[in-house]
Image (cartoon, rainbow, N blue to C red):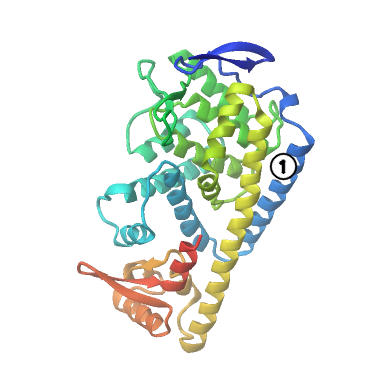
Amino acid sequence: MTENIILANTIVPFDRQIPFNQLPLLPPDAVKIYSTEVLLALNNANKALAELKGLANQLPNQTMLINTLALREAKASTEIENIFTTDEELYENITIKKEEYYGDVKEVLYYREALWAGFNLLQKKQIITKDVLIEIYQKVKQSNDGIRPPQTRVTIKKASTDTFTGSTIYTPPSGEKVLEKKIENLLNFINDDEKYPYDALLKMAMAHYQFEAIHPFRDGNGRTGRILNLLIMIQKNLLNYPILYHSAYIIKTKSNYYNYLQQVTAKRNWQSWLLYLLKAIETTSAYTIKIITEINQLFETNKQLINKTHPKIDKATIEKIFEQPYISPKSLLSSNIKSLNTAKKYLLQFEKLGIVNHKKIGKEVFYINVDLFNLLKSY
């Protein structure tokens, strides 16, 4: 079905069944970007993100947040793709450290692995390259695949329960040279702040649309694109670690997310998309601040209790039981705790204080930080 769309202020025919090779390069016309509404939303989002970064920097041990929040983001991001797992399944698999994961749990853990792979590559390279994108994608999909070849037909289908279920709503660009040109433009736009001196959050929002519109991989583009969002914020010094839990917002507003992406394609309506993603950043920054504050308060309360009843237990050991809700005795081993017997003794003492409960799976016994588990499950 052919319809008309607006490109470069000109109405042109658009067929959803044909690869959209005329996808415009970045940046879009500045007139379509800057408005009073966008500037106000940008100010609010930057303020909220700066508050989040500042709060995280004040904490003595960010590891407690990094492990916990990265996993929540992984769980939420995979839910956007209709991949679901329970908190219990997720934490049990991580704690037991099985050699092979099964079902939807593995998808969440692959996402987390991809997130950290991207973060570590960014620390080394300082820029986001095609190799970084491919590495993230390969971790998400556990594949050796790369940029999709020209013969691969990829279409975006309408996901709903109405009579149009399965109808094609978009066909991304195709062809080796076409994809190469558009990916090169995207990466130059992200990395070159002198040539493209946009505010970092606007750059992230525009890059996210462009990545999803290019759809460079056979599958896993949504998850790879959301990891790219976090890497851009880290690259631009808006965050130090991937602690923004922004996929939760997209889950709650999923129809708007896809609708505003489509409006950029069909109408070059950048404003609605930018306002949506800036609101997502503002809202989830406040949301993440609330989680961090509650985790820190819970930690301080338990630390005071442990210090009062067992003053010889060091702070690092207490922090360990807040890195994730499920704890194995092995996870407590450190330079201060060198034997499993000591680790088990401490966990039994924590259980007597009501901080953890033990649970047996197979032959293994591990411990659940009940209040931390319930806190995270409520978000």
Residue sitting at x 64%, y 61%: 55
Q: Is residue 32 left or right of residue 87?
A: right
Question: Is 221 drawn above or below residue 291 in the view shown?
Answer: above
Q: Quadrant of residue 29?
A: top right
Along the horizontal axis of the image, is 99 left or right of 139?
A: left
Farthest left residue?
A: 363
Residue 339 visible within the image: no
Out of 204 and 103, give the one closest to the viewer.
103
In the picture as drawn, the residue positioned furthest to the right comes out as: 36
Q: Is residue 107 depicted above or below 316 in this figure?
A: above
Q: In this figure, which residue is indicated by the disc labeled 1? A: 42
Secondary structure under tag 1 reads: helix
Amino acid, disc 1: Leu
Which residue extends farthest bottom? 309
Q: Position of residue 333 (x, y in %)?
A: 36, 69
Residue 276 picture location, percent across and down: 63, 40
* Nearest the eye: 241 or 205: 205
